[in-house]
Every structure is written in C-alpha cells, then in structure tokens.
Image (cartoon, rainbow, N blue to C red):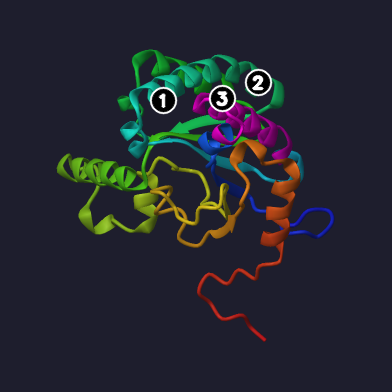
Amino acid sequence: MKTENNRNVPRHVAIIMDGNGRWAKSRGKKRQAGHRQGSKTLETICKQAYDIGIEYITAYAFSTENWARPIDEINNLMNLLRQYLKTSLKNASRDNIKVRVIGDKTGLDKDIITSIDRLEEGSKNNTGLRLQIALNYGGRDEIVRMTKKIVCDIENNKININSINQDLIEEYLDTKDIPDPDLLIRTSGEMRLSNFLLWQLAYTEFYFVQKHWPDFTIEDLEGAIEYYSNIDRRYGKVKER
C-alpha cells in the first residue's frame, strides 16, 4: 500500500511478541510483570498502526505449546488474559478496533470464551484497525483442524473432493477473509516461526528485532515499515526490465 509520502506500508503485519519474560528477568521482576507490560505495548502499537496505514495486525499471544510452561505462569497468563479481555471492549470502541481471536478457543476456560465472544460481537462494526489475537494457536494445529472440517464436509456432501484448492483451504482456516501478512515482526532476537501462521506466511517478509517486546516502540514499527518499503516483492516472478 502506498501512503502519501509514497512509502510502501504493509497492509497486514503479524507480530511474534517475544521476550516478555526476559524483559522482566533483566529488571529483577517476575515474568508476569513482563507479560503485563507486553500487553500494554500491544495496545500502544495498535492505537497508532492504523494512522500509519496498517489495516491488520495479528499478534501471537499464547501458543498451543505454551501449555507446557510452569502451571503458575500459565495461571498468571490466563488471569492477565481475563483482565485484558475485560478492558478490551472499551478500548476497542475508543480506538475503533475490530477484534477477532484465532486459535482453538475450545481449549480455553468457559469464562474466557464468553469474554472473547462478547469482545468480538461488541467490536464487529468498528471500522479501523482489525486486530487478530492468536490464543491457544498453533499453525500445525490450525492445519489439522482445517483438514478435519474439510473431511467432515466431504462426508456430508457439502463439498466435492475435486473442489479442493488453495482458495477453498483458506476458507477453512482461522484467518478466513483476512489477507496474508505482508510483514512478520519478531522481537527478542529469535529467528524462527515458532509454529505461527505456517500457511499464511508463505510469501511474508520477515523483520527481526533484538529488543524485547515490552521495549518495542512506534519508532521500531516505523523502522520495520522502512525495511519493508525497500523490498522488491516478486512472489517468485521475474521482474520485467
């Protein structure tokens, strides 16, 4: 997308918000303090992203693998999520953000699912930034769930096996009706996907930042956009001379 200063701005930015625990440890705080600060950072970035020209942000909040963490940390994360969801509807209305949660919501507690449903319903008519929060999400798990839904619909004669193509598969993914990310940002110096949006990131540009997520600023986002703006995206094609 071209902005008024002729800069290419990614329409959709995916973010792996890494380093919350390390941020807290470096300051002598408990890991939950890092997660709390990380949620504030996401809120700050979302407030300003739409004005820059970004239409979608998908943030990796809790993966299917995160259940293997110590039980105390999981409980703290779930309680933080509860608090976040309580204030998110008000914030989404204030900032005109449409919120959608992707992932296997059936693996979450009932009160959390109720809060998610309330947030999605209450923000569905907002016309600004579209924020996807990945909760209990894993790219492989999404593909498995997608496959099961397709097989079920074939068995119930809703679709024909010969109709299966990339477009149809995308209709069964959590990200249905959402364009693939143009840019992936991962903080804290790690350089891997960690099972995030494995189908959707096929042609996404990657940008890695050394600083931990709680320290990520709007200036860092601008730096990522500047990096993206200078890339010649060809999608496997040869550019005409």
Q: Earlier in the sequence, mark 1 or mark 3?
A: 3
Disc number placed over residue 219 in the picture, else none:
none
> Tag 1's secondary structure?
helix
What range of the chain is rendered magenta? 25-49
At horizontal 50% and vertical 28% (from top left) the residue drawn is: 31
> Tag 3's secondary structure?
helix
Q: Please identify the residue farthest to the left as the structure is shown.
A: 155
User: In this rendering, is residue 187 above or below 232?
Assistant: above
Q: Tell me the amino acid under the disc marked 1.
A: Glu
Q: Which residue is identified by label 1?
A: 73
Q: Tell me the amino acid under the disc marked 3.
A: Ala
Q: Is residue 69 left or right of residue 122?
A: left
In front of the other: 180 or 141: 141
Q: Measured from the top left, where is residue 112 in percent x and y?
A: 41, 17
Measured Cα–Cα span from mark 3 to mark 2: 21 Å
Q: Measured from the top left, where is residue 115 in percent x and y?
A: 46, 16
Q: Which residue is identified by label 3?
A: 33
At horizontal 28% and vertical 56% (from top left) the residue drawn is: 163
Q: Is residue 1 visible?
A: no
User: In this rendering, is residue 116 above or below 127?
Assistant: above
In front of the other: 237 or 203: 203
Disc number placed over residue 91 in the picture, else none:
2
In front of the other: 73 or 220: 73
